[in-house]
Amino acid sequence: MQPARTKKQMAMIQTCKANYAHFLGRFAYIENATPAPDGAEEAAGGEWVRFDLWPAQAQVLQELRSRRQLIILKARQLGLTWLVLGYALARILFAPITVALFFSRGEKEAKELLQRLKGMYSRLPAWMKEGDATIDNSEEWRLPSGSRAISLPTTGGRSYTASLVVMDEADFIERFNEAMNAVKPTIDAGGKIILISSVDKSKPESPFKRIYRGAKAGETAWHPIFLPWFARPGRDAAWYAEQTRDSQARTGSLDDLHQEYPATDTEALAPRSLDKRISPLWIEACYAEMKPNKHVRGAPSLLGLEIYKLPVAGRKYVIGADPAEGNPNSDDSALTVVELLTGEECAVLAGKYEPSTFGGHIKTISAFYNHAPAMVERNNHGHAVIGWLKDNARRVRLLHGHDWDAETHDKEDRVGWMSSTLGKALLYTEAADHFHTNAETKTKILHSESSYFQLASIEGATLRAPDGMADDRADSYALAQVGRIEAATNRAVPLARGKVKGWGANG
């Protein structure tokens, strides 16, 4: 039975209903079981303390109230699970008949979320509560108002119409897609869904990561939030340096550091660096994320074209092109435009284009970028693209690959880059050297997030992306880099290796 309330208490409830930050900071308690990051003493593990919101938490709380579909990628130990539980508690108390569903990596963890929620409720002032629960067990908790919270296994949720769905540790849920298929329709009538997780680097193409990337690219209705390691007060450069030393000493890499305590979302989402051909650390040092230019006057109107840097009169550019078959089940064809002098990524085109269509796109983009020459991969479909360009695009200079030597007057027509075992090795040797050199000076030469992840995924043993991941953008970027060498020196790799440094202004 709901207790009698004074006018002052009723006014406070109205204040809390309008301002969830005030409610949590004034009345919510959370269990404090995490040591302070700077080594200072905190309350003993298990003690409940007032929920004093950090600035980052307060900002996220505003997003929780205003967005319907949120995906939160975060470093560890930022109190975000408690924040989402506090938000759920406010909804249960102040919104009409809220039904909140909780999922986590396993059924046990989902039940733990429900226990935490009930612990927060039990510590509210008596006048703020609605009375004793009408159902109270490890799987369901129902208040007299009809609001309830339910913990579910990842196979559950299909029979509920939810006001709020929370999926904690979402990147670690084994049957994530099954859970999403069950619960996503339940909130389509106006409910809210929140995905929250640190990353599992063992699954570089997990559904959680794909949702986050799509949200960040603005391709879906999801709203992305990223919280870095320094979102927690007390974590400073000295603390981070200690975590860095520990990660390197234990594993020989920074993969664990970037999984648990990322500074950027690209660090978090990048594949593990061990056994990769190009160190993700080099790529990260060279990466400055940019959004593609839209509605550029005079630019080619091609589906799939992303322009990061517009052509400048008098400057020279090079195209790298990786053709594919062009049917719905094939890989994407991709091309990358880079500036000749610096190797900076200027534009990317990717899509399922038939060889003649792809050749036409190379011709169009070459003309736009001051008649840039093109290095086309000479594989099965590459032969068709090269043939089309020879017949229909005489102004596109076709560059030669590693199996051509201008000095010996090679009569055989070997335009393009031969994708042999040697060709792949040389291709990624040049790409790796390019990033290593620019990483030392932190020169920002990469702008596409998709290019970043594909380049960082290339395996050292196979020189390909792991199964299930694409590498067409990585190949086209690497092809553009070897193309720069012949375009600048008139000699193909490997004969011209090392001759790119010291070019005059703009080649």
Image: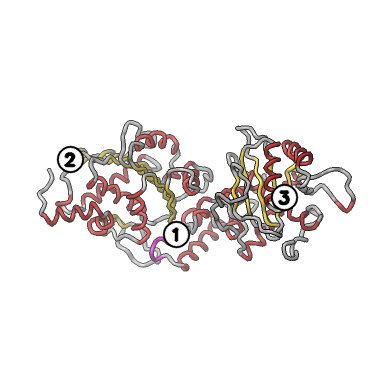
Q: CA distance from mark 2 to mark 1?
A: 40 Å
Q: Is residue 351 visible?
A: yes
Q: Nearer the viewer, mark 1 or mark 3?
A: 3
Q: CA distance from mark 1 to mark 3?
A: 36 Å
In magenta stretch: residue 277: no
Q: Is residue 225 left or right of residue 391?
A: left
Disc assigned to residue 427: 3
**Which residue in the protein does label 1 denote?**
229
SS category of the residue bearing label 2? loop
**Which residue in the protein does label 2 denote?**
144
In magenta stretch: residue 229: yes
Which contiguous range is marked in magenta?
A: 228-234
Pointer 3 with pointer 2, Cβ within 8 A: no
Under mark 2, the amino acid is Pro
Mark 3, Cα crowd under 10 Å, few <14 / some 14-19 / many 20+, is: many
Return the residue nearer the eye: 174 or 262. 262
Identify the residue at image location x=18%, y=56%. Answer: 12
Identify the residue at image location x=36%, y=44%. Answer: 68
Q: Is residue 157 left or right of residue 303?
A: left
User: Compared to 167, does 439 lie above or below?
Assistant: below
Instruction: Give the mark nearer the N terminus: 1 vs 3.
Output: 1
Percent across and percent down for residue 389 are 75, 41
Mark 1, Cα crowd under 10 Å, few <14 / some 14-19 / many 20+, is: many
